[in-house]
Amino acid sequence: MAAKIIDGKALAAEIKEEVRREVAAMTAAGRPAPCLAVILVGEDPASKVYVNNKKKACEACGIRSREILLPADTTEEALLEEIRRLNADETVDGVLCQLPVPPQIDKMRVIETVSPEKDVDGFHPLTVGRMVADRPGFLPCTPAGIIELLKSAGVDPDGKNAAVVGRSNIVGKPVSTLLMRANATVTVCHTHTRDLKAETRRADIVIAAAGVPQMITSDMIKPGAAVIDVGIHRRPDGGLWGDVVFDEVSQIAGAITPVPGGVGPMTVAMLMKNTLRAAAQRRAAQVKGNN
Ligand code: NAD
């Protein structure tokens, strides 16, 4: 039987609509709409598309967005100074720098310079620490979106075996943490995993985040498993590929996300949610400070 297709685009639209309503309530109460500042360094075409998608999502939600475009030869110090300026700007609630950054810039220094109160990407080590320690805080957008996709498909990770393929700071590690928090038994696979197929075949939930086009085939999937495809790869014909061979895996899996229309739109929707949350927290702190 063919798998249930998990519609990330529709779920993302619902989440953005919820955010839009809350933003409208915020402005109706006389408070300023949330504001997201996005820095883009250089001309990477994929990054430009991502930044534009974020801008469009902000518009749809009533969130103000500020785009800061810096040339590819920007020095690390100049970029960090821009981030510090946005951290100090009372009219800005969320700050992010689109990755990757050019080679003269240390990505970790960029991430560590964003104020944790405005860390809507959820990449700052303090934010990551809060997540790992089960403390309240921003959740990174793609992993949080993956958990929402599973929920929407009626897949409760509690007691299930989950295999995460990939251990990056942005996807693999945090989604493993969130699955563990949801009571799954999690196996994290990576380039040193001896028998990847054996690991994925045991899993009720497979998160494909290796960044290798079309690497997950139907013989690697247990019948009925939920498969979330995080990969995004440009095809020679201009279309998109995921890490999963959708046509064959969808014949075996119980539920599967498509590419495009799966994880991608959810990442942006969760960013909108985090920006709203950052604004609400900052407004609440300001009221407290004025009392
Ligand atoms: P990354 O390159 O930082 O990490 C890839 C991970 O996969 C590494 O930990 C590596 O050990 C593992 N890996 C690579 N080849 C493997 C193999 N053959 N077998 C087992 N493990 C292997 O990538 P990333 O930033 O985590 O992104 C992964 C993919 O997800 C990319 O295609 C990226 O474009 C995509 N992505 C999509 C979204 C979205 O919103 N949809 C967000 C972030 C990343």
Image: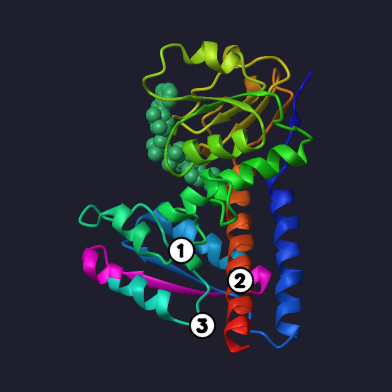
Residue visible at 73% across and 19% down? 224
Q: Which residues are magenta?
A: 59-80
Quadrant location of residue 160?
top right
* Residue 62 horizontal side relative to residue 171, left or right: right
Mark 2 is on which residue type? Answer: Gln
Q: Which residue is mark 1?
A: 116
Q: Is residue 60 magenta?
A: yes
Residue visible at 69% across and 31% down? 157
Q: Which residue is mark 3?
A: 91
* Residue 5 horizontal side relative to residue 286, left or right: right
Q: Position of residue 151 (x, y in %)?
A: 74, 40
Quadrant location of residue 201?
top right
Image quadrant of ligand 1? top left
Which quarter of the image is occupied by the N terminus? top right
Q: Position of residue 154 (x, y in %)?
A: 79, 35
In the picture, the disc for residue 281 is 2
Q: Earlier in the sequence, mark 3 or mark 1?
A: 3
